[in-house]
Image (cartoon, helix red, strand yellow):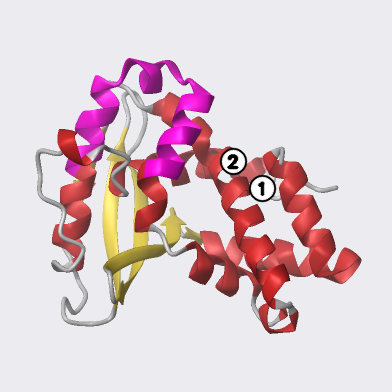
Amino acid sequence: MKPFLPSNLYRLAQTFLLGAVLALGILPAAQAEHAVDPKATPDVFLGAVANNMLDAVKADPLALKGDVSHITALVRQYALPYVDMNKTTRLAAGRYWRQASAQQQADLVKAFTGTLIRTYSGAFTRVTPDTTITLLPFRGDKQADDAVVRTSVSQPNSSPIGVDYRLEQTDAGWKVYDLNVEGIWLIQNYRNQFAQEIGRNGIDGLIKALNAKSGQ
């Protein structure tokens, strides 16, 4: 089975979650210094959770040591509430989503969630006490239902990396559903790979492949 992330995109994959964990607030509410309001403007919302996340990672010895099991638990507990994985999976599946049964759709969301968590957890090993994230000037309409928030992630001895977040306004407030690292959108990247796998082995084959990738 071909990997769901081409080797030449591995660095970008590592950066996806680096940016995501900094911007999605993997942080217990009791430790938060900045109030997170999902119904604030998209840049204010993302800025608050980004500042909380960066401070938390730098203060967490297990995260800084790259403990994958600990990282995975943190992602599941604190990042996923800020992500609309149903929409992310639906858009990645494209036209095949409508062909899937309700059970297949649920299984696909679960499998894809596990794959993304496992694939991008390694990004935490890139966080250092000198890591910074900067929100770039917001260019969109703050009253719109869909927005893109641009950030720049800086690491010691490397060039800043642009990470953009596409958010949608939901009943619960803003949620992230897509990421762009240096011009590559997550959904578009996986849509092509999903289509190839479904073409070979069907929707159940895609679910099986994703589960194998994430070790489920």
Magenta stretch, main secondary structure class: helix
Where residue 216 sits, quadrant-wise, is top right
What percent of the width, then of the height, locates residue 133? Answer: 24, 41
Q: Check disc 1 and report the residue beneath it.
A: 5
Q: Residue at x 21, y 75 (%)?
A: 140
User: Which of the marked residues, 1 or 2, is nearer the chain's N terminus?
Assistant: 1
Mark 1 closeness class: few <14, some 14–19, many ≥20 residues within 10 Å:
some
Between 193 and 46, which is closer to the camera in this rendering?
A: 46
Q: Which residues are magenta?
A: 51-77
Q: Nearer the viewer, mark 1 or mark 2?
A: 2
Question: Can residue 36 be seen by looking at this rendering?
Answer: yes
- According to the picture, the residue beneath numbered tag 2 turns out to be 119
Above or below, 142 against 60 in this view is: below
10 Å crowding of disc 2: few (<14), some (14-19), many (20+): some
Instruction: Tell me residue 182's x, y (percent).
Output: 43, 53
Q: Amino acid at mark 2?
A: Thr
Name the residue located 84 percent from the left edge and 60 percent from the top edge. 205
Residue at 64% of width from left, 77% of height from top? 94
Q: Quadrant of residue 58?
A: top left
User: Is any part of residue 130 visible from this angle?
Assistant: no
Task: In the rendered view, tell whether residue 53 sits above or below residue 182.
Answer: above
Which residue ends up furthest to the right in the rendered image?
Answer: 200
For the residues labelled 1 and 2, say whether their Cβ atoms are less than 8 Å apart.
yes
Q: In screen coordinates, is 102 left or right of 201?
A: left
Horizontal arrangement in the rendering, residue 153 relative to residue 183 (left or right): left
| Residue 67: in magenta span | yes
Label 1 – label 2 distance at C-alpha: 8 Å
SS for callout 2: helix
Q: Residue at x 38, y 47 (%)?
A: 79
Number of marks in the image? 2
Is residue 53 covered in magenta?
A: yes
Whether 135 is drawn above or below 105: the answer is above
